[in-house]
Every structure is written in structure tokens, then in C-alpha cells.
Image: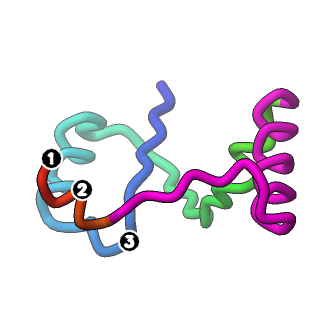
Amino acid sequence: MQSIYRLKANELNDSFLEGLKTTFKDKDIEIIVSEVDETEYLFRSEANKERLLQAVENVKQRKNLVEVNLDDLENV
């Protein structure tokens, strides 16, 4: 059985450890810790990668931008 847990390091607590113990009981387990690179994850899809790179280019060229008035958001 394999399980992947994705969380922030500061979310590790006794409750999480107790959950692991309950799930795997007396079985041997291996814990591997790796830092998640969000950019790498988002670039896995070629379509998503192209869209994100185009968005970065739009910001650099200051085109196709949407401006939001923060005062308008407070009233929502």
C-alpha cells in the first residue's frame, strides 16, 4: 500500500502521527520527505505550461492585464 500526504511542515503534529500509526498499524513503513516545486508540477501539462508562460510574458509587456479596484472587493 502506498499513500502520499502533501502538507506544510508546520502542519505536522501528534494527530498526523497518530493517523499514520492507525493507518499502517504494525507494518514497516518508509518515510521520504521532499520539497514540492509548484512550478514543476504546473508545467507537467504542455497546455498549462504554454498558458503560464504567456501570462508571464503578458505581465512583462503590460498587455491583457485585468485591473481590480480593492475597494470593490470589500463590498462583495
Residue at 30% from the left image edge and 36% from the top image edge? 24
Q: Mark 2 or mark 3, which is nearer the start of the sequence? A: 3
Look at mark 2 in the image and give the residue it sits on: 73
Report the side of 10 relative to 28 (left or right). left
Q: Amino acid at mark 3?
A: Ala
Residue at 79% from the left image edge and 43% from the top image edge? 43
- Specify whether residue 48 is painted magenta: yes
Q: Nearer the viewer, residue 53 or 58?
A: 58
Nearest to the eye among marks 3 and 2: give it: 2
Q: Residue 76: which numbered mark, if any?
A: 1
Circle 1 packing at 10 Å, graded few (<14), some (14-19), many (20+), is few
Q: Amino acid at mark 1?
A: Val
Report the side of 64 relative to 26 (left or right). right
Rendered image quadrant of residue 42: top right
Label 1–label 2 contact, CB within 8 A:
yes
- What residue span does the magenta drawing correspond to? 46-69
Q: Nearer the viewer, residue 44 or 28?
A: 44
